[in-house]
Amino acid sequence: MSFPEFGVHGGGDPSGGILVLLDQVLERLAGGGGDNGGSFELFPGLAELSWNIHPMIVHFPIAMLTGYFLMDVLGLALRKAELRLAARWMLYLGAVGSAAAAAAGWYAAQRVPHGGTVHEVMVWHGRIGLTVAGLASVLAVWRWIVQERLVAMALAFQILMSAILMAALALGADLGGWMVYGHGVGVHRLDLPDEHHHHGSGDGQPGAEPAAARER
C-alpha cells in the first residue's frame, strides 16, 4: 500500500504538498490514476482494515455508555431531568453500538491471526464484550419502559448495574488494548526508517535511545 506525499518531515515539496494531495484526490475521484500509476488510495486505513471493522466501531459504544453513566449521575445529583433524558438516549445508542461491536469482534476473532499466548486474552475480551452488550441492552429496555418513573430501590439498582457496566467496559477495553499494543493482534510490524525515529526509553525519558541501540 502506498500513501500520498504530504510534503512534511522532509519529504516532497513543502510548498506544494497539500496541492499535490488535492490534485491526486480529484484525479482519483475522476477515475484516473495520475502520473504515479494509480498508487494513491483513498482512505488507506479503511482499506487496510478490510473486513475487520471492529476497531472502527468499538469506540462509539465506549463513548456513548461512558457518557450515559456520567450524565445520568450528574442529572441525579443536580436534579436535572433534561440531563437524564440525554443520558437515556446515549444509553440506547450505546446498547445498539455495543451489540454491533460485539458481533464485529466475534467475526474478527475467527479471522485475525493470533497465537496461543493471546488466545485466552481474546476469549475473555469477547466474553466481557458480550457482557457489556447484554447489560447495556437490559438497561436500555428497562429505561425505555419505565422512563424516569423510578422509585428509590429501583433507582439504586439501576445505578449499581450501570456501575457494573462501567467496570466491565473498562476491563474489556483494557484487554483489547493489551492485545493490540502488547501483542500486535491485527496490526503489522512497524519498520522505523533510520533517519526518523519517535521513541521513548525504558526509563521514561522521551527521545532516549533504546537499550538495544545503546548496546550496539
Image (cartoon, helix red, strand yellow):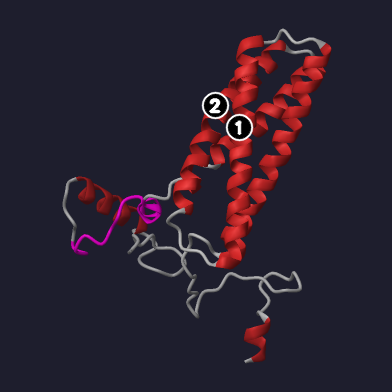
The local crowd at label 1, few if under 14, some if 14 to 19, many if 20 or more residues have their Cα within 10 Å, is some
Which class describes the residues within 10 Å of circle 2: few (<14), some (14-19), or many (20+)?
some
Q: Which mark is drawn over residue 134?
A: 1
Mark 1, secondary structure of its residue:
helix
Q: Residue at x 18, y 63 (%)?
A: 35
What type is the residue that disc 2 sits on? Answer: Leu
**166 up-or-down from 54: above or below:** above
Secondary structure of the residue carrying numbered label 2: helix
Q: Residue at x 62, y 85 (%)?
A: 213
Q: Give the magenta range.
A: 35-50
Q: Nearer the viewer, residue 27 or 115?
A: 115
> Residue at the location (20% across, 50% down)?
27
Residue 173 in the magenta stretch? The answer is no
- Examine the rendering and report whether any part of residue 64 can be seen: no
Q: Is residue 198 above or below residue 3?
A: below
Of the numbered discs in the image, which one, if any, rests on residue 180? none
Q: Which mark is residue 93?
A: 2
Mark 1–mark 2 contact, CB under 8 Å? no
Query: For the C terminus, which image quadrant?
Result: bottom right
Determine whether 84 is above or below 70 in the image: above
Percent position (x, y) of residue 106? 49, 46
Left or right relative to 58: residue 162: right
Q: Return the disc, 1 or 2, that comes first in the chain's sequence.
A: 2
- Residue type at mark 1? Gly
